[in-house]
Amino acid sequence: MLAEFCGATTGSFVSQVRKALAQDFQRVHACLTSLRDLAFGGRKGDPGFEQWKAWKALQGGSAADLPEGVQLPKVCAAWHGLVHDLDPRAGLRALEACTMMSLRKSLRRGSVWIDHSLSYRERDQMLIPPDQWESQREQHVELLGIQVAEGVPGAVVGQPDHRNRSGL
């Protein structure tokens, strides 16, 4: 299948996949369009989130190709040549493929999230809030049976002793 999209087999396998994704614009565009209504949140400067915001802005204007003079988000070196193609239509298609792959990576690493998702929500939402941790830290540590070093925040002295815990 890859051969039918790329024709010649020059470059690495990964570069061939990038080219194939950029040329398979119908499926890539359909994938991104299906995600359009999700309320993504993300860290400022995250490539996947910045590309997502740029793609949504371009879609708001119903762009069929990259408008001249548009400020593109930063893309990695591997995608740069494809996204900054001389053909603006090919550049938009490559940007869509790059956005899809970058968004996937950002979701997996936790720098982009969906608030209502259990798997892909903000990392801070999965943790005990800082003010609650400060007030209840000793209780949580005691429940886990961990010995902590005095005066060194977060330093563990010993492993949990499960032999003395009848309720666990």
Image: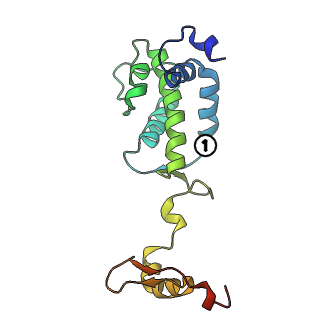
Q: Position of residue 140 (x, y in %)?
A: 52, 83
39 to 126, vertically: above or below: above
Q: Quadrant of the C terminus?
A: bottom right
In front here: 115 or 11?
A: 11
Q: How is the image coloured?
A: rainbow
Q: Position of residue 144 (x, y in %)?
A: 55, 82
Looking at the rendered structure, the number of numbered marks drawn on it comes to 1
Give the labeled residue for mark 1.
37
User: On the image, which quarter does residue 80 sit in?
Assistant: top left
Q: Position of residue 91 (x, y in %)?
A: 45, 19
Tell me what residue is drawn at x 37 percent, y 45 percent.
45
84 to 99, vertically: above or below: above
Helix, strand or loop at mark 1: loop
Label 1 crowd bin: few (<14), some (14–19), many (20+), radius 10 Å: few
Q: Position of residue 125 (x, y in %)?
A: 52, 65
Most distant residue in the left direction: 151
Which amino acid, mark 1? Asp
Tell me what residue is drawn at x 51 percent, y 40 percent.
103
Tell me what residue is drawn at x 51 percent, y 79 percent.
159
In front here: 9 or 95?
A: 9
147 to 126, vertically: above or below: below
Most distant residue in the top direction: 8
In front here: 60 or 34?
A: 34
154 to 126, vertically: above or below: below
In front here: 101 or 89?
A: 101
User: On the image, which quarter does residue 121 sit in?
Assistant: bottom right
Task: From the viewer's perspective, tell me whether residue 12 is left or right of residue 3.
Answer: left
Q: Quadrant of the N terminus?
A: top right
Tell me what residue is drawn at x 39 percent, y 12 percent.
86
